[in-house]
Amino acid sequence: MQTSHSEKIHSILETAFMTPSSATDPALVQHQLRGNVLVVTIDHAPVNALNAAVRRGLIDAIEAADGNASVRAVLIVGAGRNFIAGADIREFGKPAVPPSLPDVCNRIEACSKPVVAAIHGAALGGGLEVALASHYRIAFEGAKLGLPEVQLGLLPGAGGTQRTPRLIGAQAALSLMLSGRHVGAQEALRTGLVDRVGHSDDVLTEGLAYAHELIATRAAPRRTRSAPGLADKEASTAAIAAARADTQKKARGLLSPLKIVDCVEAALNLPFDEGLQFERAQFLECRESPQRAGLVHAFFAEREAQKAPETRDARARALHAVGVIGGGTMGAGIAVALLDAGFIVTMIERDDASLARGRAHVEKVYDGLIAKGRLNDEAKARAMQRFSGDTSYDALADADLVIEAVFEDMAVKKAVFAELDRVCKQGAVLATNTSYLDIDELAASISRPQDVLGLHFFSPANIMKLLEIVVPARVAAEVVATGFELAKKLKKVAVRAGVCDGFIGNRMLAVYRAAADHLMEDGASPYQIDRAVRDFGFPMGPYQVIDLAGGDIGWAARKRRAASRDPNARYVRIGDELCERGWFGQKTGRGFYRYEDGARIGKPDSEVEAIIDAERARAGITLRTFDDAQIVRRYLAAMINEGANIVHEGIALRPLDVDATLMHGFGFPRHRGGPMHYADSVGLDRVLADIREFAQEDPLFWRASPLIERLVASGKNFASLNQAA
Ligand code: 3H9
């Protein structure tokens, strides 16, 4: 459908008698008289974002419509796959260029001829606001309408907060703007966001037919500013109060959600133009905030991270059938992620009993979703039809990709890979889900190292968005490209990582957790550390995470690494002490917290505090107090410094890859844009000064990254490295 529409629009653009709408950029908005309808086409690839030239072009087009007596109606359409994806996000943070989008929307609304918006694909943010300022709206099947500004730290700032509630009521408008979710054409029709749904493939023809119908019935411009959606003042007041109470609970320091509620209140209580002014002031405050900068950085970082050099240079191999080795929590989660993306999955386990357990793990994930009402039995049955299990590797002969998720032990993994080498067809991608083992060594152990890739999922693998694509030295570019293609199909954020202990995420985790341990031994309680980290914006503090994942996992890793640890490096034994008592966290009812009667939220434990005190005494620590800000400074400095080392060594391609990793795999607050963006926002020189100050106490742990030193010396920041790949 979209192709035919876009082809049509482009063929119109190529015809004669076209009037460029903007002297500065003639191609972006075109208008052409088709009979008595002025067709205004926005053609700004890839998503018709409303940059200055498009805004100017829209005003010119409406002026042209008003000034031409032959024009009886206006039809606004988007070329390509979308109507309009919103304001041009790349313009934020740069000097504003007139006309502003609110002025454009007001001009459209003031047009003396009926204006129809024909919506296909995305009509988001400012794009939907253009449609709301139009007088009539038709949305086509497959359209995505929404006001997602909140996800960028903004609010709809081109009349959206004033027009939407007038059109669909306060409650529905608040729900749309506070969630940022997209709605389809049918739902948009039901809520009153649009007037009709278009069913044909031909947006232009059906849009024109609608415009002609309006002309024939002498329909007048119908301005949303006068729509009656807020007529029931009592219901609107109640909806606003409820949204405010809910948002106060959930917003966690975010600026724009409460401002959205304030704007809807202004829509209810103020005349339209005053409401617009109020909205503008709130919008500008959000636009200038560091939260907006962080969230826009996050938006681009997760898209840029997908553009590894191999995805440009090589073609992905075809993927249909996938094998998963191991039916534990990780293997089952990976299997579910694959099934959800439509793959045929074969699970391999060593014997029937293990296979039955693996299958049960997979079913348990689906049953959990059914219990929460997110899935029905039929959908589960459909997914399970594509699932099979076997105890023989021979069942993988036709697999296009195999992902092993067995025990973290090099010898065990090598044995698995030897089998894969034996049975898999030529060209199959052989992937390991190892968290830290040397994938170069693993690849070198078989006859086809060019096919070996790291695919590091995070638990629960069907939920967590992050997928580290770990690139060993001898892998073929097309195998790496296949990893990125898989991530796209799984709807994951893929980040390219080099081979090292822990890759990007877990390597950083080890360091900032050590910084937390040092703080704890020096005098901060784990409860204070968790609170300070949560208040910064992480969903959980480090000790809550340990209790959730199981303290025994880190304990086993520490024991494994004991022999290779630098004997001069500071080592905090508190975690080991807890594990020696069998306190592994939630699953054992005790860890850093106490979980009474299966509670998921732990309570501080005085016995843990006594153990910490004893360890402090044993280590001869002179106790100090830290305020929350000091805790966060150390925690973040350790994270940023290791992130810089990772970029310096080429393990991550750019700082933005580190940001995407921490945001999608480790709960780094999105509105702060990831640790590297955060470092830039506080000033890299300040971070370096912190590291140097902390180094006076522990020079071994706090060694400033050469990359930070170099950037500070040359007056640059991490952002300056994000362009180069
Ligand atoms: C707003 O409107 C404020 C107003 O209320 C008030 C103003 C006064 N600008 O995602 P994709 C780029 S705030 C600039 O991979 P898809 C994107 O970076 C805005 N660029 O494609 C990528 O570039 P590249 C509210 C944008 O098909 C390319 O387009 N709107 C914008 O998977 C393709 O993007 C939003 O928040 C933009 N607005 O998904 C909508 N949008 O090729 C944000 C995209 O160089 N956009 N790009 O990597 C989206 O949700 C998705 O991009 C969309 C397409 C669903 C449209």
Image (tube, grey):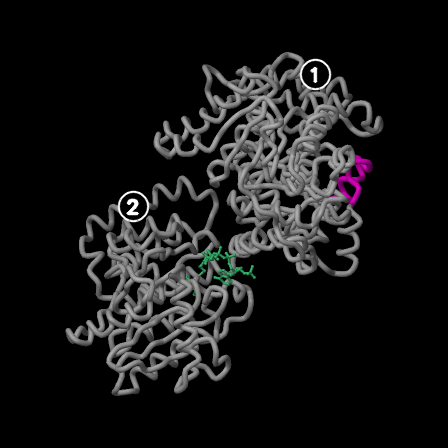
- Residue 699, magenta (yes or no): yes
According to the picture, the residue beneath numbered tag 2 turns out to be 241
Give the extent of the magenta segment: 689-704
Q: In this view, does 558 lie above or below 211?
A: above
Identify the amino acid type marked 2. Answer: Ala
Q: In which quarter of the image is residue 617?
A: top right
Task: Indicate the secondary structure of the residue bearing disc 1.
Answer: helix
Q: Is the N terminus in the top left, top right, bottom left or bottom right quadrant?
A: bottom left
Residue 217, position in %: x, y?
15, 73
Q: Which of marks 2 and 1 is nearer the N terminus?
A: 2
According to the picture, the residue beneath numbered tag 1 turns out to be 614
Q: Quadrant of residue 437?
A: top right
Assess disc 1: are there few (<14), some (14-19) or many (≥20) residues with their C-alpha within 10 Å of its C-alpha: some
Q: Is residue 369 above or below residue 70?
A: above
Classify residue 459 as left or right of residue 3. Answer: right
Task: Choose between 93 and 359: the one closer to the eye.
Answer: 359
Classify residue 428 as left or right of residue 47. Answer: right
Task: Choose between 447 and 717: the one closer to the eye.
Answer: 447
Q: Is the C terminus in the top left, top right, bottom left or bottom right quadrant?
A: bottom right
Residue 462: mark in rendering = none
Task: Choose between 46 and 168: the one closer to the eye.
Answer: 46
- Residue 490, magenta (yes or no): no
Task: Indicate the secondary structure of the residue bearing disc 2.
Answer: helix
Residue 322, position in %: x, y?
56, 36
